[in-house]
Image (cartoon, helix red, strand yellow):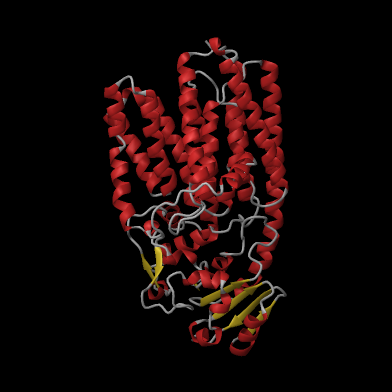
Amino acid sequence: MWQKLDFKRSESWRIVLFGLVALHLLPIWIFPFFPTQDGVSHVYNAHVLREYWNPAYDFQTFYDINWNLFPNWLSHFVLAALMLVIPPLLAEKLFLSAYVILFPLAISYFLRSLHPDQKPTIPLWISFFFIYNYLFLMGFYNYAVSVPLFFLMVGYWWRYKGDLHLRQIITLNLLFVVTYFAHLVPYVFTIGAIGLLSLLTLFRTPKQLLVSLASLLPPSLLLLIYLPTSDLLSGGQLKIGFDRVGDLFSSFLNLKVLVALDDRQVMIAKAVTAIFVLYLVYSLWQQVVQGSSIENQVKNQMIAFGLLFIALFVQYLIYPNSVGPGGWLNDRIAILSVLVLLAVLVPIHHPILERIFGAVVLTLLCVNLLNFSVSCRKLNGEIREFNALRGEIGQNKVLLPFFFDPSGSAKRIGIFVNGSNYYCLANGGINLGNYEVQFDYFPINFKENFQPPVEEKEWVQAVHWRKDSIDLCGYAKNVNYVLVWGEADQKTTQALNDCYQLVADRGKLKLYRGQRK
């Protein structure tokens, strides 16, 4: 039997939990802009949803709403609902705050489902490093929310796995529905995780195993209904390979999923890896060397989640980065798999060792958060500079954005790639750099009769990455303004000078007027 902690002292974990949550909310609220790559695009498209029937705007002239029941609806729906009462950027802050709160609470629920008699202290603190992960800062809001939903569902199933009744099955499937409308990857891997854990833990009780697997039939059926109609299968079969195993293993070991804004995050990520490795060694030592002091039930639990981690990790190593138009698959699996390892970490029962280890984790967390805040402050200055000409854009104008400095000083994310959406918020602007319109898993699409700058399905890619393929002079009649950020190439500059009127010049930020009336 494990030695129980001093519960009077360990109740302080709740104070630490709420304190850490409050600290992690600060970067969202103390700066005007939260720097991500795609986040402002989701805000803009939610704004279009909110104002689609507003006669003051021309959204119905340009856009159609895709009402199909696809994943990725969650953030757009919630943001649009919030915009009924508050401005778009404030709605974004509330949505992000809900994510920051949900993340550790879901991990806490998951860990307490595994160890109901223990307080989820150090493993829970470690999870805070993953709140502001690379994919979240890419602006993948739906995926970000679905990560805590994954652990919420697995934790819920674990609590009731041996006694699943209709109420628990309905609750679990309702959580599946929410996750489906958030993101497909955690949805699929939750089905797989619960299925695997069912086989590993319930094989001695066939009736309970059958009930558990049967509870996965509705979400599996929903998946089978959606996939054949989705562009996700347009790229053909899933191509499994081993050619990137070395690079992917190195990225996983160095926790590259924690690196997004600056080089200092590289060092912090390596420190988190060291903490994880030391804790895993301690946990394995407890099981192998001190095995007699660990209950068989806990041993089986560690083995089950260890095998789940291996299953996720192998898929991380062999899957391609993209499936159809969906990308970053390896990074998405990496975040899930590394957090699953928290289930293998055992409580530290040596008081002095626990205090030392906890102090190291909390100190590094504070360093990480301080560094993140410093980066946010710097990037906010750049975003403010980028937004200097927002007042020059009138209502219901068509904007063509060109970015020659898409990332600014950010290390791995392009904070300006979708920055033109700032110029189209709250004024009915039509953004020709709106990447979401070309995919069937987003709610806003251009109408079929819309004339794009390039005649191809994914024409927005040309706006972002192949500007030289656009006939700027020929397209001038379709555009009110062209926004340029960074030093344009000679061909683009010549075409803009020949066929557009320079309205404002702020150095690297320029605004040209087109010929559209």
Where residue 281 appears, as percent x and y from the top left, is 63, 24
From where the camera sits, is residue 328 visible?
Answer: yes
User: Residue 415: which quarter of the image?
Assistant: bottom right
In the displayed orientation, state which residue is furthest to the bottom.
498
Q: Quarter-wise, where is residue 362 in the image?
A: top right
Could you say which quadrant of the image residue 67 lies in?
bottom left
Can you say whether 262 is above or below 417 in the image? above
Q: Percent x, y for residue 45? A: 46, 63
At x 30% / y 47%, what residue is drawn?
222
Name the spot of residue 264 as percent of width and height, x first: 73, 47
Q: Residue at x 32, y 52 (%)?
A: 226
On the image, the x and y values in percent for residue 78 come to 43, 52
Q: Nearer the viewer, residue 60 or 280?
A: 280
Q: Is residue 405 left or right of residue 124?
A: right
Which of the pair 84/412 is nearer the observer?
A: 412
Say left or right for 72 vs 483: left
Work out whether residue 104 can be spotted.
Answer: no
